[in-house]
Amino acid sequence: MNQRIIYPNDEGGVSVIVPAPECGLTIEQIAAKDVPQGKPYQIVDVLDIPSDRTFRNAWEYSE
Amino acid sequence: MPIQRITSGILADGAIVATDIANGSITGPKLGLTAINANNIVNATITGDKVALASLSGNVIVANTITTNLFSSTIYASNNDILGIKANGNTFSNTIIIFEGNTSSISVGDIVVGSNIAPNTVVLSFNSPPANRSNITVSNSLAGSNTNTAISFYSSRKILSPGIAGPGLCKAWVNFNGTGAVQIRAAYNVSSITDNGTGNYTVNFATAMPDVNYGACYEGLADNADNNFSADNVGTLTTNGAVQTRSTTAIRFNVKNSSMSSFDPATMSCMIFR
């Protein structure tokens, strides 16, 4: 699955949900289940997530 | 001429030997102590009050329905069966000499497990007297000669019931790459992982645990860029597995190096038992 789900976490950063392959759920079902209740989220392409994690904890969520 | 129907009577031992029993039905109060040999049993129904001590042998047995009102309770593996019979002994060639442990209840065909014992090694025979099965011959040659080595025997003829085996089974696991574009390599009962930051992950279960009293195990690949590590430590476990939060639906943890700094492991695994 080449999609990711992003949402703002409680630490002020951004959390990235990585779906498990062949888990039998759609990305929307995973978002409904695994994004904390009440959090806004976006479904993005994996290529939109930086692969350079040097400053991973400084990532911010934007609408 | 093929037998069309048997309404009563007794078939002698070994009376049914066929290359193909297809779309047929075997119905009776008891199938016992009898061997049914066939190359192919297809789409057959075997129905009986009790199917016990029978042996079915053939190349293929495919049945839509096998219905019994009662399976003998002895064919289900108990907790002790799952734990196996433990003993110590000397091994050489195809022989095991038991000198510690009670192996009086082992059977021919039991699977033998231990160091230098190849997988799928089974008991072929054992010495008399029956109460002292100290000299056991097994199916595979044992690697080298070993003294006082731990050996376990497991039945190969027991049905494993989820009701008994369930608590010992891994309920969820995941293996992922925490570097670069984080990727799950393989998983079971995991819908996703959440990358919360450097070395900080949540494993989300596809099917929730019954409560939070589960056991969690972690394994990770070392941070070999950590100057506090010697070369010997490269590739060894470095996570402290500090659990931040857990619920019935997810568990969150940190991965740290020997300096207690969070880092992203190239290989990280999490296993859940309940």
Image (spheres, rainbow, N blue to C red):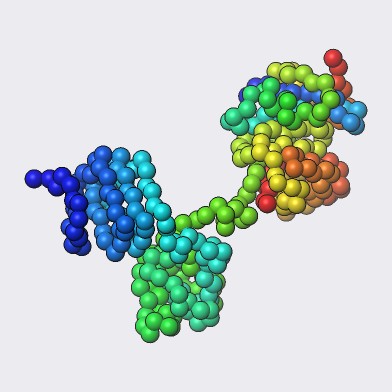
Is B25 left, or right, of B99 in this rendering? Answer: left
Residue at image x 77%, y 32%? B195
Look at the picture and state if B73 lies above or below B136.
above
At horizontal 30% and vertical 39% (from top left) the residue drawn is: B43
The front one of B139 and B65 is B65
Q: Is residue B21 above or below residue B138?
A: above
Give coordinates of residue B25: x percent, y percent.
Answer: 27, 45
Q: Residue at x 67, y 47 (%)?
A: B271
Residue B56 sits in quarter: bottom left
> From the viewer's perspective, is residue B201 above or below residue B73?
above
Q: Nearer the viewer, residue B189 or B230?
A: B189
Q: Can residue B255 be seen here?
A: no
Q: Tell which residue pokes out farthest to the left in this image.
A: B1
Is residue B48 in view? yes
In the rendered view of the protein, which quadrant contains the N terminus of chain B? top left
Task: Give residue B30's quadrant in the image.
Answer: bottom left
